[in-house]
Amino acid sequence: MTMQIEAAVHRAISSVDDPEYPGISIVDLGLLESVEVDHDAHVRVGLIPTFSGCPALAVIATDVQAAVDAVESVQSCTVEWLSSPAWHTDRISHEARACLEKKYTIAIQLGQRSPTCPLCASKTEEQSLFGPSRCRSVHVCTGCGETVEVVRG
Amino acid sequence: MDDFEAFLNDGGIVESDDAMPDEYRTAVFRFIELHANSEHMGGLTERDWIPRTPGLRHKMAVIAKTQDEFGHGHLLYMVAADMGVKTRQEMLEDLFAGRSRFHNVFHYRAKTWGHQVAIAFLVDAAALASQQAVFKNCSYGPYRRILKRIIAEEGFHMRLGEDRMMRIAQGSKMQRELFQQAIDDWWWPALQLFGPDSKPNDLLLRWHIKSERNEVLRDRWVQKFVPMLQSYGFTVPDPGLRFDEEQDRWVAGPIDWEPLKKTFANVGPDSARRIGEAAKHWEDSKWVREALATPLPELSDA
């Protein structure tokens, strides 16, 4: 029974989208670290933030809480923001990465090399360390000239 | 031009290095420049409120929103400059000299926290609705792709605005009075953000920059916010507002467009101070741009 609840809780959390990227689940972005369900169906969810100053933390926690509370047989739910491990771009799933590139024209920084342009696959160059959000910088494509935002690693 | 318009009517998307008629280039450029200027001026308003915002939770949101607005402005200036009409430097110089335009709502002063709540709740919703209507059918590719991200972030601002509104609406008598005063002060500027009725031959509509007429967007906003504010016990400062039983909808009273025209001419209630502050801020932050542009000295092994 506990395992069934755990699976249902996992599905519920997967349905929560990042408030700044509608259509992309927080699970695919690598924000979910742990789900614990005890024998009395009390749930503990551990999340990790991309950046500690992210303004969306309260909204995400509220959405996760509501999603888990709606799962049948769950008695109670606690949502916590964990201080470790630290989030990194390698926690983003392939699906979310493809969606960020295709739908949002956002590339992901993995390792030291500047990411390629989501439109034409040419090299991008950093234009500004900071963009509209703490977790993104601004690059320019050397091929097509597109302004590309990059999720910083 | 006929071929070009046929291309647009077929859902064609124009990229920055494509050939395009000068009239189209100028119209799109002016529209993006207005948007960029407005994000920049909006960022400055948010920044003013970082030290004045009550509570850590709201303060964190205001800090992030400040970065958001400047970041949006930054991206939009890049896209606008790419069109080859004006450089970014020229756009900023025009803004600081009062030669170019930015949205009407940034020509008023946000004097109280209540005002900030009303702005986040009413004005952000109006701005988001306008941007969504542009994104829906925008024929200029680079702008459309950036709008996609801007809209996602502005949607998040809306949630923060609702959160602020709920807290103040459920607060003390004093908080509720503060918010009612803010609604009285900001209702009309927010409603006028949509602009006067679109002209029959509006080129921005014809060239698929805008997808909906100003009056349609404005009316939709009225239908949403009148009942919402009333349900929380607040009043809307429009003496001509009435509910049409037959049509089952709210009908706004006559609109005085004079205040909007003044903001277009950069002579609104707070225009001079705002533009002056923006120019001063740009000057004060010069050292940061210079420092960032200076290459780091080579590290020696010695």
Image: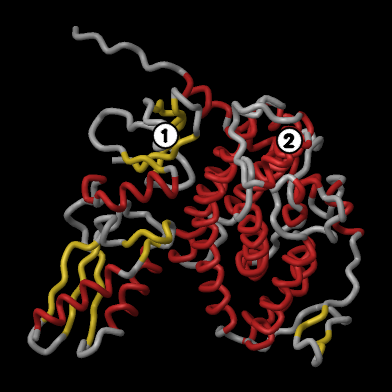
- Disc 1 crowd rating (10 Å Cα; few below 14, some 14-19, many 20+) is few
A83 to the left or right of B147:
left
Report in which chain the residue with disc 1 lies. Answer: A
The answer to whether any part of residue B277 appears in the image is no
The x and y percentages for residue A72 are 24, 88
User: Which residue is located at x 67 percent, y 40 percent?
Assistant: B7
Total residue callouts:
2
The x and y percentages for residue B120 are 61, 65
User: Which residue is located at x 48 percent, y 46 percent?
Assistant: A132
Q: Quadrant of the C terminus of chain A?
A: top left
Q: Nearer the viewer, residue A88 or B286?
A: A88
Q: Nearer the viewer, mark 1 or mark 2?
A: 2
> Where, by quadrant of the figure, is residue B130 drawn?
bottom right
Q: Which residue is mark 1?
A: A129
| Alpha carbon distance from label 1 to label 2 | 42 Å
Label 2: which secondary element: helix
User: Which residue is located at x 86 percent, y 50 percent?
Assistant: B201
Report in which chain the residue with disc 2 lies. Answer: B
> Where, by quadrant of the figure, is residue A65 drawn?
bottom left
Q: Nearer the viewer, residue A62 or B221?
A: B221
Q: Is residue B301 above or below residue B112?
A: above
The disc placed on residue B265 is none
Q: Quadrant of the N terminus of chain A?
A: bottom left
Instruction: Say what amino acid the circle numbered 1 marks.
Output: Leu
B2 to the left or right of B234:
right
Q: Residue furthest bottom?
A: B245
Label 1: which secondary element: loop
Q: Which residue is mark 2?
A: B3
Instruction: Say what amino acid the circle numbered 2 marks.
Output: Asp
Q: Is residue A99 above or below residue B73?
A: below
Q: Is residue A127 above or below residue A91?
A: above
